[in-house]
Image (tube, rainbow, N blue to C red):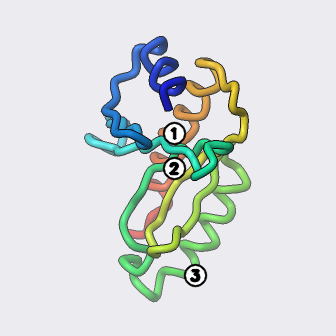
Amino acid sequence: MDHIADLLKQLDMKFQREEKLIEMRWKTDHFDDLRIRIFPNESESWLYIIAPFQSFFDVDESKRAQFCYDLLKASWQANGVKFAIEDKDRLVVIAETNDTDITSDELRVLVGHVVHACDVLFDIYPS
């Protein structure tokens, strides 16, 4: 995570760091305080850039099927990210890489894709 923190500093991106977790906050067209988390897997062979959202079950039951369809279509169209439901049933936007020699440009692109995809999720989330 030292390498990732150094890259974020080079990119002049603000973040907070714990031992194995980096958290960033972004302001976008739809979010005043979007949380992005960066962390490795246990063996540090993969890096995850993730934006957690609320529970999938917060979506009205009558709208879930259409929402899932919209998420799958958005996943196909999105660059470098996935829309998913994690183990605790939270919606997430995630980018991942097993490039252990990631460059600052590659990290900037991945973070940018996640941030942009969060605005896409906002647009398709049922109201």
Q: Name the spot of residue 104 as percent of width and height, x first.
A: 59, 18
**Mark 3 neighbour class, 10 Å CA radius: few under 14, some 14 to 19, many 20 or more:** few
Q: Secondary structure at mark 3?
A: helix
**Mark 1 neighbour class, 10 Å CA radius: few under 14, some 14 to 19, many 20 or more:** some
Q: Quadrant of the C terminus?
A: bottom left
Q: Number of numbered discs present?
A: 3
Residue 125: which quarter of the image?
Answer: bottom left
Q: Secondary structure at mark 2?
A: helix
In the picture as drawn, the residue positioned furthest to the left comes out as 32
Would residue 79 be seen by someone viewing this image from the given angle? Answer: no
Q: Name the spot of residue 85 as percent of width and height, x first.
A: 54, 69
Mark 2 touching mark 1, by CB under 8 A?
A: yes
Residue marked by disc 1: 116
Amino acid on which disc 2 is placed:
Val
Would residue 117 be seen by someone viewing this image from the given angle? Answer: yes
Q: Name the spot of residue 123 as percent of width and height, x first.
A: 46, 54
Residue marked by disc 3: 65
Drawn side of residue 122 relative to residue 100, left or right: left
Amino acid on which disc 1 is placed:
His
Residue drawn at (40%, 77%) of the image: 59
Q: Secondary structure at mark 1?
A: helix
Which of the labelled discs sits on residue 120, or is there none? 2
Relative to 9, say whether 88 is above or below.
below
**In front here: 106 or 7?**
7
Residue drawn at (39%, 82%) of the image: 60
**In front here: 29 or 46?**
46
Drawn side of residue 68 relative to residue 62, left or right: right
Rounded to the nearest angstrom, the CA distance separating label 3 from label 2 is 18 Å
Residue drawn at (40%, 14%) of the image: 12
Rounded to the nearest angstrom, the CA distance separating label 2 from label 1 is 7 Å
